[in-house]
Amino acid sequence: MGRLEGSHILHGHKGRVWNVAWHPEGHLLASCGEDKTIRIWGRDGQKWVCKTCLSDGHSRTIRAVSWSACGKFLASASFDGTTSVWTYTKGDYDCIMSLEGHENEVKSSAWSHSGQYFATCGRDKTVWVWEVAEDNEYECAAVLFNHAQDVKKVAWQPDGTEWVQCANLTSHTSTVWSIAFNGSGDRMASSSDDLTVKIWQEYPPGNAQGIETPDNIPAWKCVCTLSGYHSRTVYDISWCPLSGRIATACGDDKIRVFQESPESDHDAPTFELEGTADGHTQDVNAVAWNPKEVGLLASASDDGTVRLWCAK
Amino acid sequence: MLSSLIKKSRSFIGLGDKNAAVDGFVEVCSAEQAEVATESFMDPEAERLKMEEFKEIVYESIRTIKDPEKPSTLEDLNVVYEEGVHVSSMENSEVLLVKVEFNPTVPHCSLATLIGLCIRAKLLKSMVDPFKLDIKIKEGAHNTEHEINKQINDKERIAAAMENPNLRSMVEQCVQEPD
């Protein structure tokens, strides 16, 4: 039986903290919020301290932050309609690029694992895919109009080398707030305003289960629904590539950790609630597992704090 | 054996199985947490009175909200009404859940969303204790009520809308306390 213990509370942001993201090496944590700042946190002995505060990047709420897989770049997506790309040189972060194009609030951004592509999405219902050239020039490769409403989140499959619309996954009965791939990229978890978490599985062409794959594009099926656990909107979800644990951020102020049951069936998996963490005094907006340290989890909340937790 | 069966069936079936969820939760969390959970439950009568009181405070707060278009309050126009306020407790939490139903005078989308914003803003301004809030249009009052309900409860959309200075000042005018 697992436990989720709070280890650090990081103060600094004023007002709601919307998002947290770990540097791929795991030693730095970026956070952002309605105070229009990005904060970079790092270890200082036993404590975590704010190493940098970037306050001139955006004119409105910064909704999300994400790091490139190589760790050299940090992106910030803002309600001001722009996405900024930052890089660390000579002891400071510089904004090297400000991507425009979205008609209104940008809500999420992510680099592909190869670093070749960068995606942004927002309330204008579009997903923009940018190609990153050698000299760090970003060129818009495509604007995707597949969504009928506000797009909350983008995420790349871990080993995806090409992007192609392969599926329209319908199952949730209300807004889907977040998605997360597992370490190997053959499963994805989604969290929703309908109070559930769904687990999706990829079935490649020629799969043994006989799932059809028209046009030789992999099919995705919902193989598990976790309901009855969350009493409010599930704002974020994170799938640890090291331990396989799934963490959720919920509007009931709690963080929950799920783990696949030992006797789970591959095509009809079951997940157990391993632990619940109380601590935040308001909605939890984001959770993120550290990519290098097993069990280390970060969270962001409306209560203005970023918290670190240890899952045992 | 039984608890793992409960947990397994819950992940397949889920929603209806509230009791199993409560049992499962107490089973999974540590002994100390279970103790704290039982200690914080008030006796049912005190709990009911607390919620009644909360409901009154909520209605007192929203009834004086000014209508965005007409020189009247939402109560005067029957946009909000006492029966539209519901207060309930949430599982494993001390925080109360407030549900407010409202009936917009005209089926105009932007007005309905504006009223939704005003109700939320007024409550955030006047309530002291923490609470969770769901605002809904009265069923049948609007042909796109599902969409409007989603929007007026979408925290991200609300936050972005309130960053618009014109919208914010309109809301502030509506929720200003009467002199």
Image (cartoon, rainbow, N blue to C red):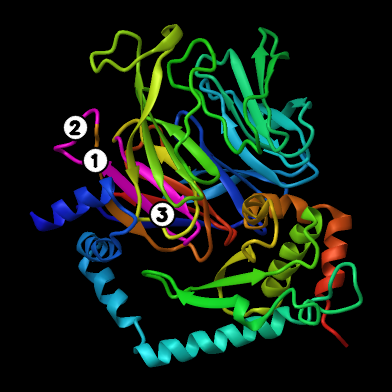
Q: Comparing marks 3 and 2, which lies closer to the viewer?
A: 2
Between A307 and A125, the one lying in front of the other is: A125
Image position, residue B135 (x, y; %): 62, 65
**Is A82 placed left or right of A285 in the picture?**
right
Task: Give SS at disc 1.
Answer: loop
Q: Residues within 10 Å of mark 1 (few under 14, many from 20)?
A: many
Q: Residues within 10 Å of mark 2 (few under 14, many from 20)?
A: few
In the image, which residues are magenta? A244-267
Mark 2 near mark 1, Cβ–Cβ under 8 Å?
A: yes
Image position, residue A69 (x, y; %): 51, 22
Q: Comparing marks 3 and 1, which lies closer to the viewer?
A: 1
- Vertical position of residue A276 compared to residue A42: above or below: below
Is A265 a magenta residue? yes
Of all chains, the one bearing label 1 is A
The residue identified by callout 1 is: A270
Q: Residues within 10 Å of mark 3 (few under 14, many from 20)?
A: many
Image position, residue A158 (x, y; %): 43, 21
Kind of residue at disc 2: Asp
Of all chains, the one bearing label 2 is A
Q: Earlier in the sequence, mark 3 or mark 1?
A: 3
Name the quadrant of the N terminus of chain B: bottom left
The residue identified by callout 2 is: A265
The residue identified by callout 3 is: A255
**Residue at point 85%, 85% (across, down):** B178
Kind of residue at disc 1: Thr
Q: Residue furthest left?
A: B1
Kind of residue at disc 3: Ile
Is A302 a magenta residue? no
**Is B47 placed left or right of A132 in the picture?**
left
**Residue at point 89%, 56% (across, down):** B166
Distance from the alpha carbon under mark 2 to that under mark 1: 7 Å
